[in-house]
Amino acid sequence: STKQIGPVSSAHQLGKIVCDQTTASTWGYIVIFDAATTGAVTLGTTQPKEYLPLMPAAINGFVNQPPGDAFANGIVIAAVTTVPTGSSAIGTYINCSISYN
């Protein structure tokens, strides 16, 4: 199933995302939305503010220079198979570390 997470529900800056999908054989993507709740995002329809490609069988990530990328409403994140408006969950589990202020 496709899971969306909303680590914050107000204005913040995204500093870092590091994810691994070390058991995957295909590409995946982390899509990042400027939204206060997961209910404000419809996967497959809502355009993400940013996305991070996840190379198969690898650790992937990005780090922004302080203060980070600004999100006015909040930060909602999902893992999908295509961008920018993918709605299918990636086929393997991923582990992510997210830093924001």
Image: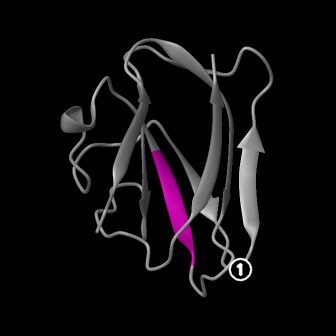
**Who is closer to the viewer here, 53 or 16?**
16
Main secondary structure of the magenta stretch = strand
Q: In this view, does 47 lie to the left or right of 58?
A: left
**Who is closer to the viewer here, 20 or 72?**
20
Vertical side of 35 occupied by 32: above or below: below
Identity of the residue drawn at 37% across and 16% down: 73
Q: How is the image coloured?
A: one colour
Residue 32, position as x, y percentages in the image: 46, 41
Q: Is residue 16 left or right of residue 81?
A: right
Q: State which region is magenta.
A: 27-31
Image quarter of the C terminus: top right
Residue 6, position as x, y percentages in the image: 39, 34
Residue 43, position as x, y percentages in the image: 26, 53
Identity of the residue drawn at 28% across and 63% down: 87
Tell me if mark 1 has few (under 14), some (14-19) or many (20+) residues whose alpha carbon lies within 10 angstroms of its own. Answer: some
Vertical side of 87 occupied by 63: above or below: above
Residue 10, position as x, y percentages in the image: 40, 13
* Mark 1 secondary-structure assignment: loop
How many labels were placed on the picture? 1
User: Would you name the residue on which mark 1 appears?
Assistant: 57
Residue type highlighted by circle 1: Ala
Picture quadrant where residue 34 is located: top left
Identity of the residue drawn at 26% across and 43% down: 46
**Who is closer to the viewer here, 11 or 96?**
96
